[in-house]
Structure formats: C-alpha cells, structure tokens
C-alpha cells in the first residue's frame, strides 16, 4: 500500500492528522506535510482513515 498527499489540493483542515496522527504530519500552518511512501502493514488502516477524513480528496491510498 502506498499513500500520497496532493499538496496542491490540501486546504489545511488537519483532519488527516486528527484521524491518523501516527502517519500524517502537519506543518506550522496546519497543512499536511508531503507524503509519498509505502505504508507499513500496521498503519494501513491509518492510511485509509486519513483518506476518508480528507474533505479535499488530497489523500490517495493505492
Ligand atoms: S485533511 Fe486533507 S486538506 Fe486537511 S490537512 Fe489533511 S490532506 Fe490537507
């Protein structure tokens, strides 16, 4: 599983980090820090939770 964040679509709602703080990090303004990496098995549900929480569809899990 791989998770990416489209920084151009991120509007700084911080919901991804609220839903899955072990995986998603925010900058000082509340925008998600860039992420494009393989997800460890124990964080796969966190990735899905972050994707579901993002109202801008900026988080993609594949
Ligand atoms: S929930 Fe979506 S819009 Fe909000 S910080 Fe996370 S990636 Fe950005």
Image (spheres, grey):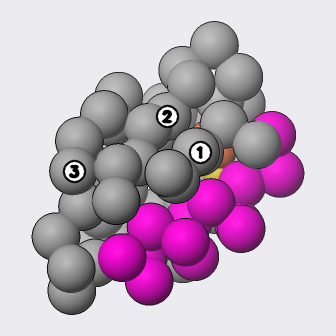
Residue carrying label 3: 38
Residue 51 in the image: above or below residue 43: above
Magenta stretch contains residue 24: no
Residue 56 in the image: above or below residue 62: above
Stretch of the chain drawn in magenta: 44-56
**Residue 6, image x and y in percent?**
56, 25
Mark earlier in primary sequence (1, 2): 2
Residue carrying label 1: 59
Residue 16 in view, yes or no: yes
Asked whether the residues under the numbered discs 1 and 2 touch, taking CB atoms below 8 Å apart as contact, a structural biologist would say yes
Mark earlier in primary sequence (3, 1): 3
Q: Residues within 10 Å of mark 3 (few under 14, many from 20)?
A: some
Q: Is mark 2 within 8 Å of ligand 1?
A: yes
Magenta span: chief secondary structure: helix
Q: Is residue 49 left or right of residue 29?
A: right
How far is mark 3 from mark 1, CA to CA?
13 Å
Tell which of 18 and 58 is nearer to you: 58
Q: Is residue 2 left or right of residue 5?
A: left
Work out which quarter of the rendered image holds the N terminus and state it: bottom left
Q: Residue at x 59, y 45 (%)?
A: 59
Q: Is mark 1 within 8 Å of ligand 1?
A: yes
**Residue 36, image x and y in percent?**
31, 34
Quadrant of the rendered image containing residue 53: bottom right
Q: Residue at x 55, y 72 (%)?
A: 48
């Amino acid at each position: 599983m791989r998770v990416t964040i489209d920084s151009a679509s991120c509007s700084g709602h911080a919901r991804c980090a609220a839903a899955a703080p072990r995986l998603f990090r925010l900058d000082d303004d509340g925008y998600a820090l860039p992420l494009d990496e393989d997800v460890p098995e124990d964080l796969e549900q966190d990735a899905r939770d972050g994707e579901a929480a993002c109202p801008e569809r900026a988080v993609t899990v594949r």
